[in-house]
Image: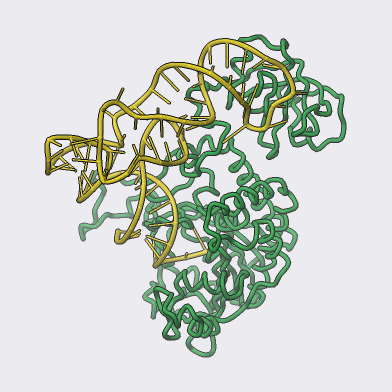
Chain colours: A green, B yellow
Amino acid sequence: MFNQRIKIKELLSGEKTDYNCTVMGWVRSFRNNQFIALNDGSTQHNLQVVAALGLLSDETLKRITTGACIKATGTVVASLGKGQKLELKATDVTILGDSDAEKFPLQPKKHSLEFLREIAHLRFRTNTFGAIFRIRHSLAFAVHRFFNERGFVYINTPIITGSDAEGAGEMFRVTTLPLDGTAPKNENGHINFKEDFFGRETNLTVSGQLEGEMAAMAFADIYTFGPTFRAENSNTTRHLAEFWMIEPEMAFYDLEDNANLAEAFIKYIIRYAMEQNPDDLQFLSQRLEEEEKQKPQNERSEYSLLQKLEFVINNDFQRLTYTEAIDILKECNYNKKKKFQYLIDKWGVDLQSEHERYLVEKHFKKPVILTHYPKEIKAFYMRQNDDGKTVAAMDILAPGIGEIVGGSQREERLDKLVNRMKEMNIPTEELDWYLDSRRFGSCPHAGFGLGFERMVQFVTGMTNIRDVIPFPRYPKSAAF
RNA sequence: UCCUCCUUAGCUCAGUUGGUUAGAGCAUCUGACUGUUAAUCAGAGGGUCGUUGGUUCAAGUCCAACAGGGGGAGCCA
């Protein structure tokens, strides 16, 4: 009966003392041959297990090492020491799993994030990653809660897709055909995918949006939350080859409704994490402040992580159009003094990250919702505005992260959609099923995609996206 | 993919203008101490200086290529 254990979070949050219980967890440090700092992942805090001198054999004492898994039974008492309110006065300590002190890579000291990334299978056992993944869980849970409260239907869109016409990025091929050159060929000498498992070319999904739109044409409000794959050779702190994306799609929403939902959604899940994980956020906030102290003064941020989150949930996001943004950028000192690597000279250019950062971090100092982009730099399915130049697109830019949401009102008018697809050389035959939604009961609708890891980055303050997903996948890396 | 920086003990780092036997803290091991908070004190072990090639009387130190990592850019969420 292992489940008679009490979780350390529950034990430490109680006011009650002088009762017997059993805890199980992993040793963080062992001081003075008496004091075991024990963590079971339920909370940031360790439980101090006190094994009185003489209670345990020398042989057992030697096996209580950093990383070892133990079971401790005893009495919960008010602590005599200063660092904690409660502690467990042990009557018995059993070793469940040894951890060779000479080989276990984690020590009771600070490790670099780079080193921990190399031992991703063990980094869950550190304070920092414990906090990150408990917060990640809360955010994921809050995603479902938010949409459920609003009557959205959770739709699972396919991970293996047949459509290769979305143009959302490079894709990973899915096939069971042999790679040694013996794959069946057709009369042109190309590989004959009719003989492949699915009888056609298939890939891992780059977005569930098109399928999501089909469901929105029946349930009105839906969302997806699943893994997404991009085979781009991106080596940055904000890209992964495998990441999780949330894509709501709403019938009877225009661009403004869409932006309102996105803003409310982001604030809701941040607030939920702040309520559920105050200790974890406090820890990460302090950790960042210490890191900031290493930096020169002018590079330090004005606000702590907690202050930043507080500010975001209590203030409106700044909304402006692409055209307004270009005007601001054109007139700003950075542009005039040629501090931008890419100078803003004319309407129609795509914004570089330096421009997005200027708007968000220097000019407005808050999250920004940019709308009405030129149609040339956006996807085919976005609704064309009456000016003939722009589409009803919407990007949300977050300080320190950049684009966290990309969305739009969708083009619901069949003729306009087909024309745009032809202009952009997107084969309409491949997406005939998608066009059916515009043939049969089409309606105004909108949606967006939110990169879950980028959201976790924003809330935890982690600067590298590889540190907010348990086992990151990126070019030349799929260990574990 | 491009630009840039880095690679010295298990970890974090120092190592002078190229010059004898490459150092520290933590970790590990041995011992001491025992209400400690990354416990403390004493001692010990631990290195193919990322790899390969080059320059030189002499390379951890200079040069080149490759590998791995960080940061930035592009692609985007």
**Identity of the residue furthest to the bottom in this view:** A387
Question: Residue at the spot x=49%, y=68% of the render?
Answer: A433
Question: Residue at the spot x=72%, y=21% of the render?
Answer: A72
Image quadrant in which you'd find residue A230: bottom left
Q: Is residue A354 found left or right of A56 in the rendered image?
A: left
In-front residue for pair A255/A75: A75
Location of the N terminus of chain A by quadrant is top right
In-front residue for pair A365/A130: A365
Q: Is residue A18 found left or right of B14 in the rendered image?
A: right
Question: Residue at the spot x=24%, y=57% of the render?
Answer: A190
Location of the C terminus of chain A by quadrant is top left
Asked if A41 appears above or below A200 in the picture, the reply is above
> What is the x, y in percent for residue A195?
32, 51
Question: Residue at the spot x=80%, y=27% of the render?
Answer: A80
> What is the x, y in percent for residue A170?
38, 60
Q: Is residue A477 visible?
A: yes
Image quadrant in which you'd find residue A306: bottom right
In-front residue for pair A155/A479: A479
Q: Is residue A419 visible?
A: no
> What is the x, y in percent for residue A403?
53, 66
Asked if A321 appears above or below A213 in the picture, the reply is below
Q: Is residue A437 found left or right of A57 in the rendered image?
A: left
